[in-house]
Amino acid sequence: MKETYRSENDFLLSAVRHGDQKAFDTLFRKYYPMLCAYGHRFVDLEDAEEIVEDSLLWIWENRETLVIESSLSSYLFQNGVPQGFKQTRAYRRHPTG
């Protein structure tokens, strides 16, 4: 049965889940600048870049079991990446070392 996609993001996410490195690269290039700009509102740019890279890498490493019930964009901006920003701010308030 042929898969149907509602959007380019659905297609990219499906391709990433199937291990398509080029699709992941496209996803990365598409979202990285926007997510870094979003994160820079909460942390310095260097931290934002690191958090975004880690979050997107986590998606690649967990692609086979990843469950996204909303859109990819909603997931990235509301669930996945913001957790890293929250953790960084909490660490700065209460460093453990």
Image (cartoon, helix red, strand yellow):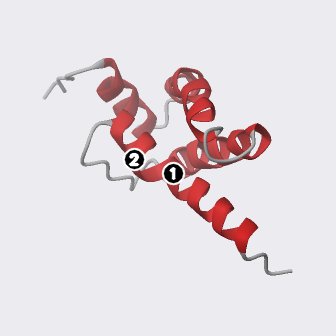
* Image: 89 above or below 45: below
Report the amino acid beneath label 1. Answer: Pro
Give the image location of residue 82, x and y in percent. Answer: 51, 51
Residue 58 lies left or right of residue 10; in this view the side is: right
Report the amino acid beneath label 2. Answer: Gln
Q: Are marks 1 and 2 in contact (CB under 8 Å)?
A: yes
Residue 32 lies left or right of residue 47; in this view the side is: left
Give the image location of residue 50, x and y in percent. Answer: 73, 45
Q: Secondary structure at mark 2?
A: helix
Quarter holding the N terminus is top left
- State the mark number for residue 43: none
Q: Residue furthest left?
A: 1
Q: Quadrant of residue 15?
A: top left
Q: State the CA–CA distance, disc 1 to disc 2.
A: 6 Å
- State the mark number for residue 82: 1
Q: Nearer the viewer, residue 46 or 7?
A: 46
- According to the picture, the residue beneath numbered tag 2 turns out to be 78
Give the image location of residue 48, x and y in percent. Answer: 68, 42
- Tell me the residue at 30%/28% (across/down): 10
Q: Secondary structure at mark 1?
A: helix
Q: Is the residue marked by circle 2 packed among few (<14), some (14-19), or many (20+) residues within 10 Å? A: few
Quarter holding the C terminus is bottom right
Q: Quadrant of residue 12?
A: top left
Q: Is the residue marked by circle 1 packed among few (<14), some (14-19), or many (20+) residues within 10 Å? A: many
